[in-house]
Amino acid sequence: MIRLPSLFLLSAVALAAALLAAPQARADEGQDSAFVSACLDVHLPRGAAVAEQRCVGLIAAGCMNRPEGATTIGQSACLLREASAWEHAMNAQYDGLLARVAGHDGASRAGAAEALANAQTTWATYAEAECGYAYALWGEGSFRQVAGADCRLNVLARRAIQLRAQIGFES
């Protein structure tokens, strides 16, 4: 399984602080993952763009509309809460797709699992660079945490949607 590398260490530190401050967030993690999956079930059949428009940002927006989402630290925590659900979805989609591709016999699929693993590794490098840039744009300002968390949410969501949309095409 490909996990996102060090770029998200900064986000992970912010998320850990938020989780310690808000025990309810841990309880919501399973619900958030279930929400993302259900939302994709409903909207992805109409296309990846529709799924992205209808499913991405809803958890974070709801969280930011509460008092704990009113500060930059709170906003970052809300964005990272949703990013965690998308990361779970992305990893599940990747694992499932890899298993399906690797399970195929025949010369036409011989390199498909390796190609998918390479694509995921390359994507993780891209995501790290992209969100590192989003974070760096804000210099020393506190909004850099929000920008980095927002980027993390969006790159994870797009990749999860992209991988989920590929299921069925590998057969």
Image: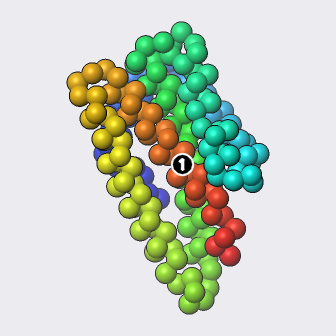
**Residue positioned most to the bottom:** 107
Report the label total: 1
Residue 82 x, y percent position in the rendering = 54, 33
Left or right, 140 with reference to 35: left
Q: Indicate whether 100 appears above or below 63.
A: below
Residue located 46% across and 21% down the image? 75
Which residue is more in the foreground, 96 or 55?
55
Q: Indicate whether 53 appears above or below 19.
A: below
Residue located 28% across and 33% down the image? 137
Quadrant the C terminus occupies: bottom right
Secondary structure, mark 1, is helix
Residue 66 x, y percent position in the rendering = 57, 13
Left or right, 14 with reference to 57: left
Say whether residue 26 is visible: no
Say whether residue 39 is visible: yes
Q: Indicate whether 101 appears above or below 122.
A: below
Left or right, 21 with reference to 59: left
> Image quadrant of residue 29?
top right
* Scheme of image coloration: rainbow
**Residue positioned most to the left:** 140
> Image quadrant of residue 147?
top left
Residue located 58% across and 56% down the image? 162
Amino acid type for the residue under numbered disc 1 = Arg
Residue that mark 1 sits on: 158
Q: Residues within 10 Å of mark 1 (few under 14, many from 20)?
A: some
Q: Indicate whether 153 appears above or below 76.
A: below
Residue 100 x, y percent position in the rendering = 63, 70
